[in-house]
Amino acid sequence: MFPERIFSGMRPTGSLHLGHYHGVLKNWVRLQSEYPCFFSVVDWHALTTHYETPEVIEANVTEVLIDWLAAGIDPTQATLFIQSRVPEHAELALLLGMSTPLGWLERVPTYKEQIEKIKDRDLQTYGFLGYPVLMAADILLYRASLVPVGEDQVPHVEMTREIARRFNYLYGRESDFEEKALEAARKLGGKRSKRYLELRNAYQQDGVDEALDQARALLQESQSLSLNDRERLFGYLEGARKIILVEPQVLLTEASRMPGLDGQKMSKSYGNTIGLREDADTIAKKVRTMPTDPARVRRTDPGDPTRCPVWELHAVYSDDATREWAAAGCRSAGIGCLECKQPVIDGILREQQPMLERAQKYMDDPSLLRAIVADGCDKARKFAHETMRDVREAMGLAY
Ligand code: SF4
């Protein structure tokens, strides 16, 4: 009924690092040529945790957009936009919030986890509790059928599905009830057909809800129908309800193996990142000062690469021959750690070069970026407008 479409967003709370590149952006670059994609800088989401420091968000919206373009997101293929520039996100979140049970939000696994983990900010707010509803609105507004997420975000997409299902159940309307009822009648034939023609009359005179009530009573009474037939008929009649919001599917993204400078997952909160557009000297310094296998105290001490975070970067940046050279040199103390780190530095800088070149274009001429965002926001608004027209109509708000 609706074409396949992808929505994904990113919070502008800092400039992006190589973890974002390998974990998310590379995947987006691939997806943009396979599906229509909507990529949004979700600044309102950032406010749910940074409401006391909005300047952080302001400083990062443009940076994040340039990072995306640097990574290879192509504005002629994907739609890039800023969430707050499409106010329909807020309207849909408000309307979905009316029918979202509080218990659903309180049970989101990441909610309690985050409240416990983030101690330097007060997250006991209405906005933070409600952010899965805002996220649902982001996705549902574009009738996105696919959402690329990692394992940890699956519960959010699940909740979006439930919110959509509940909305469709409450407000979906008869679209093609008549057609469905007739089809059911045709399939069952005989007396049963007559009953369904009666149903159609009930629908025409009293509306779909009345007809559905009658259908249920009739089906329950009817001993002549097999259980299968009854279920089938229920299916037909329920199918007469219109789908306003599309339940999205998860497009599971392989967890990024991108290690940080200390061997843990690369993350801003661990302070172990390499920025996507960080300058070459800083990158070289960061890698050169990385911890290594503690057994290699002196240059002559042999080591074990599997106990060294640099080895994990070799897994990302080096070819087989270099990895063999590093592993053998480490175990035999044939190479020093600084020597071993050089191909990693070279690999990172090689990967970064085309990104820097792409970014430079937008830094030299900021009007280029403004035009891309204006265009993306216009396009997003067009889709959002269509969905909201249907949503308002379904909820009886189209006066
Ligand atoms: Fe790590 Fe390489 Fe040093 Fe071995 S030689 S400890 S793999 S940096």
Image (cartoon, rainbow, N blue to C red):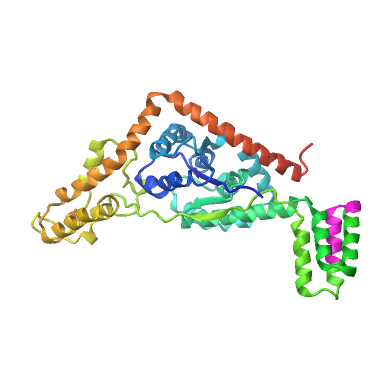
Say whether residue 289 is visible. no
User: What residue do we see at 27% from left, 44% from top?
Assistant: 348
What's drawn in magenta, residue-wise? 204-217
Point out residue 64 in the picture as x, y percentages from the top left corner: 43, 37
Q: Is 213 in front, or is 129?
A: 213
Say whether residue 201 is visible. yes
User: What residue do we see at 46% from left, 23% from top?
Assistant: 367
User: What residue do we see at 54% from left, 48% from top?
Assistant: 124
Note whether 223 is above or below 125 in the view shown: below
Point out residue 70 in the picture as x, y percentages from the top left corner: 38, 36
Point out residue 50 in the picture as x, y percentages from the top left corner: 48, 40
Q: Is 225 in front, or is 119?
A: 225
- Going by the picture, which residue comes out furthest to the left? 300
Q: Is 348 in front, or is 120?
A: 348
Q: Is residue 132 left or right of residue 197?
A: left
In what quadrant of the picture does the C terminus appear? Answer: top right
User: What residue do we see at 16% from left, 51% from top?
Assistant: 337
Q: Is residue 214 left or right of residue 66?
A: right
Q: Main secondary structure of the magenta part?
A: helix
Note whether 39 is above or below 357 in the view shown: below
Q: Is 59 in front, or is 340?
A: 340
How many numbered discs sit on the rendered protein?
A: 0
Q: Is residue 216 magenta?
A: yes
Q: Is residue 164 left or right of residue 242?
A: left
Point out residue 281 in the picture as x, y percentages from the top left corner: 23, 36
